[in-house]
Amino acid sequence: MTADATQKKYNCKDVEKKVQAFLDGRLAKEQVLHIEEHLDYCLPCDKKIEFEKKLRNLVKSKARENSHPSKLDLELKRIISAKKS
């Protein structure tokens, strides 16, 4: 392996810094390939990525639920009405 090839490989700290951009699709194709290559042999980083994906899905799911109490709706409407006056 050449020195250039070794330098291009990501280590765990590199992957950790880029997790959010990776999941958001904000990385260049070459960066994505380096991270995917790293994930092929690094179980802890692979688990971290999977955890972040699951966490994002859970947050999205909970954000879609209309689970706030109706009392909160009434209080917000009262505050908004008071601000308009």
Image (cartoon, rainbow, N blue to C red):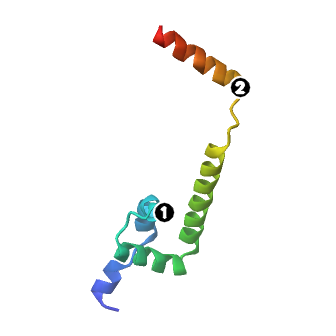
On the image, which quarter does residue 8 sit in? bottom left
The extreme bottom residue here reads 1
Circle 2 crowding by C-alpha within 10 Å: few under 14, some 14–19, many from 20:
few
The residue nearer to you, when weighing 18 against 28, is 28
Instruction: Identify which amino acid the numbered label 2 is placed on.
Output: Ser
Residue 7, placed above or below residue 69: below
Name the amino acid type tagged 1. Leu
Q: Which x, y percent locates residue 76? A: 59, 20
Report the residue at 46% width, 58% height from top.
20
Query: At 65% across and 19% down in the image, what residue appears?
Result: 74
**Residue 34 picture location, percent across and down:** 41, 77
Q: Residues within 10 Å of mark 1 (few under 14, many from 20)?
A: some
Report the quarter where the N terminus lies: bottom left
Residue 18 against residue 62 in the figure, above or below: below
Q: Is residue 57 above or below residue 45?
A: above
Task: Check whether the beta carbons of the residues at disc 1 and disc 2 lie within 8 A of each other.
Answer: no
- What secondary structure is marked by label 1? helix
Query: Residue 3, percent across and down?
Result: 29, 86
SS state under label 2: helix
Q: Label 1 vs label 2: CA separation?
A: 35 Å
Measured as percent of width and height from the top left, residue 36 is found at 47, 77
- Furthest residue in direction left, as rendered: 4
Rendered position, 9 above or below 22: below
Q: Residue at x 63, y 18 (%)?
A: 75
Q: Nearer the viewer, residue 23 or 75?
A: 75
Nearest to N terminus: mark 1 or mark 2:
1
* In the image: residue 67, left or right of residue 12: right
Residue that carries the numbered disc 2 in the rendered image: 70
Tally the numbered discs: 2
Task: Please name whichever residue, 16 or 79, is drawn nearer the observer in this view of the structure.
Answer: 79
Which label sits in the foreground, 1 or 2? 2
Circle 1 residue: 23
